[in-house]
Image (cartoon, coloured by chain):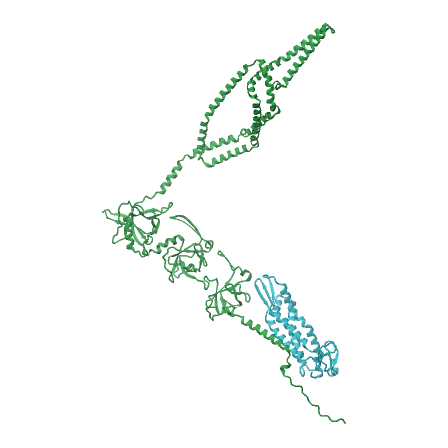
Amino acid sequence: MSGPVPQQIPPALTARAAGLVACESCGRVHRDGIAQCQRCGATLHSRRPGSLQKVWAWLFAGIVVYIPANIYPMLLTTSFGRTTENTIIGGVIELIDYGSFGVALIVFVASVLIPVGKFIAIGYLALVVRPGARIGRGSGLRGRQHLYEVVEFIGRWSMIDVFVVAILAALVQLDFAATISPGIAAVSFSLSVAFTMLAAQSFDPRLIWDAEEGTAP
Amino acid sequence: MSQQEPAAMRIDPPKRAFWRNLSMVWLVPIVALAVSLGIAWQTYAARGVQIEITFQNASGVTPGETTIRYRDVVIGTVEDVHFTPDLAQVVVKASIDRAVAETLPEDAQFWVVQPEVSARGITGLSTVLSGVYIEASFPPGEASEVRRFTGADAPPLMRAGQEGTRITLRTRDANRISEGAPILFRGIEVGQIEAPRLILSGDSVVFDAFIEAPHDRRLTTATRFWDTSGFNVSLGATGLSLNVGNLAALVTGGIAFDTVFSNGEPLNPGYVFDLFPDEQTARQSLFRGVAANAVEIAVEFDGSVNGLTTGAAVRFRGLRVGEVRAIGAVLSDDSGARDVRLRTTLAIDPQALGLPDGAGAEETLAFLEEAVADGMRARLATSSLFTAALIVELAELPDAAPATLERPEDSLAIMPSVYSELPDFTATAEGVLERINALPVEDLLNQAITLMASVEAVVSSEGTRQAPDAALALIEDIRGLVGGEDTQALPGELREGLAELRAVVEELRLRGAIDRLASVLDSADTIAANTATASADFPALVQDMQTLVDRAQGVEIEELAAAATRLLDSTEELVGSDQMRELPPALAGALAEVQQVLAALREGEAVENVNRTLASTRSAADSVAQAMESLPALSARLDRLVTQADSLIASYGARSDFNAEALDVMREFRATARAVTQLARTIERNPNSLLIGR
């Protein structure tokens, strides 16, 4: 991740070091100590208070609800009186059995790889920006920034599975012949995605660069 | 220079409590965790109890899909199907509802419900789409910790908790009985039988049957079971009988029962019923069933007992009161001469005679003794018209020779018998047949056939067929004549003509004609009289015909019918011809017109005149004709005269007065001659004109 260039750049003067604070909403620069933006009225923070705490909380909630999302059935397919339950992984395996490798890959990536990757990514970021953290200290700050951007961007795409379930459940209501209804896992999974998106949002990316200074907030 | 300042004071911010730093966001994961744990607990709690059911085979049972039902409500799901270690059986692992599992007793029954089509209907149809399921049956409430069960291959005969009675039946062979066959009570299915099995000795078959409550209340020792499988045709002492049972029983076999008498005792455990081959046997076994206190008596019959068999009924006033136990011969030397007598042993049921339940031999014999004194005798009787089978009848003959019920010490009481005139059915039938044979049927038939042939020939001949045509043509002609304008105008003209004719007739003085007409009428009278005489013979003719018809009756039907059919065909052809159909209307029309004419005639009072003068007319016409023959001669003479006169006149000279007058005379003569000629021509051309005046 880390290119050769950032290593040679000398530590820059940060806004906080200069006693300034920028409004997160409108970008106006204020002197340190001012509570509210004089232009747009938003609350001014040099660093968001309790940012990491919120990140951890959301992340933890996301992981908690991700567990039933994988254990409980995502889809309840009722056909001619027989009810078939499919979990996420079960569906992927079934798709592979049927030879639909492409669809299986998409479902697997969207429902398993991305959420799990997000947990890991957010957890990693939250760990490394912690003041006094020893993990990956001072290295690859741009890489972290990239990681954060990717996590924030990709978060909504893991809802793809939930969309599929929602559409199927809405369309396939043929009473006795075939009926598809969402299981508990569908709710859990969408909650999990929402929680991880909130976790990513709670993360203050400015913390990444604090590592450069080694200063405490 | 600058004053030394005290070292910057180290000011620590107040230590904030850890929990104050906590964000409210932490509530989210806590709630999520709680909810997840709640769901997990719920799932765990609802997981059910694991049980194992062992089946011989588990066709259609699929893990995760096959359900376990109790009273058709799902109580669990099969989770796994695997074999026992020796591969001899299939173990089905299932989880069932905890609530149900708590009441699952040790003897719960499980079986796989599959679609089944049998003679008794279609069952398990719902499993065609949904797949098989495992049905459970148990009386709830007796909880046990047993979690391993043995599944049945077929639905159990008796559902757990079902009330009823299990009985055992015994039969010689189970040919017509199969497992699950219905048990019928008056045609209603009240139970089923289980698979028949041989008893150890192998000489009969027993099977268990279950009779549902409340019908099991009817079971007593007086209950008889019989086989209703298929249909049963029997030709016996009571004639021909055909019994067809219920359709299901026809295919799978079936058993019916009834309680044939009322004072049966309640069943003891282990009581085994006999299965009778048919209802009649079962009902007749009534006697055997109570034969314990039957009283045996003997009867000695004179004459043959051919047709009397062991088991034949003993009837009293038509009611069966016992049966023939044995038939044998005994030697008796009462009167010195050794004599073979036929002794028949009868078993009499005291209850059937109406004696009280506990009546023993003594009471029965006393009763019989009294009855014999009053005229009760044993005699043989035929049991039905068609068979030679005999029964014993206890007849009441008050005017019979006095006798008593002999009661020897060492043998059975002997009831006196009377000889009975058994109708010789065979002889009678033969006589009837002989008489039928003797009937002269063939002659009769031949005559009838000849008659029919003649009739047919007449009817089918061309002449007969054409008769309607001829008649029709005749009628058409008559109608043309009558309906003609001339004929219509006849009456009026006749009147006129008659008046004229009368004068002519008067002048011609031909009165003698009327006398002749009268004589003609007289002869007509004679003819009519003759006809009447002929008619008098007609009844005789009719009688002859009647005789013929009588003979025709009872002839060989087929040829007669054929001939009759041909006759009818011909007649129909004749009647159906168009001409024949047109005949009546034509006749009617003609008659109407004739009537019209006659009416007109009567009105004009012409009839009398006609009558009177027709003859005259004819004579007149004859005379006229005669005269007409001479007319041409007259005309010729006149012509000659005129010519002579002409020549005479010519000789006198043209200009004299005489000449002129003679010329006038000559002209008149000529005109006269011309008129006469004209008249002659007219009459020649149209003789009618003389009558009608034209």
| Quadrant location, the C terminus of chain A | bottom right
- Place of residue B618 in the rendered image (x, y in percent of width and height, measured from the top left): 57, 17
- Place of residue B325 in the rendered image (x, y in percent of width and height, measured from the top left): 32, 52
Q: In this view, does A85 lie to the left or right of B404?
A: right
**Residue at the spot 55% in from the left edge and 14% down from the top edge:** B511
Identify the residue at the far left of this view.
B336
- Place of residue B157 in the rendered image (x, y in percent of width and height, measured from the top left): 45, 61
**Residue at the spot 56% in from the left edge and 19% down from the top edge:** B609
Q: In this view, does B239 lie to the left or right of A215?
A: left
Pick whichever, B391 or A214, lies toward us: A214
Identify the residue at the far right of this view.
B1
Whether residue B205 is visible to the viewer of this picture, yes or no, is no
- Place of residue B274 in the rendered image (x, y in percent of width and height, measured from the top left): 39, 57
Quarter of the image where one finds residue B350: bottom left
Residue B514 in the image: above or below residue A174: above
| Quadrant location, the N terminus of chain A | bottom right
Whether residue A29 is visible to the viewer of this picture, yes or no, is yes
* Chain (green): B
Residue B663 in the image: above or below residue A52: above
Identify the residue at the far top of this view.
B652
Q: In this view, does B545 lie to the left or right of B609?
A: left
Which shade of the palette goes to chain A? cyan
Pick whichever, B311 or A158, lies toward us: A158
Pick whichever, B15 or B384, lies toward us: B15
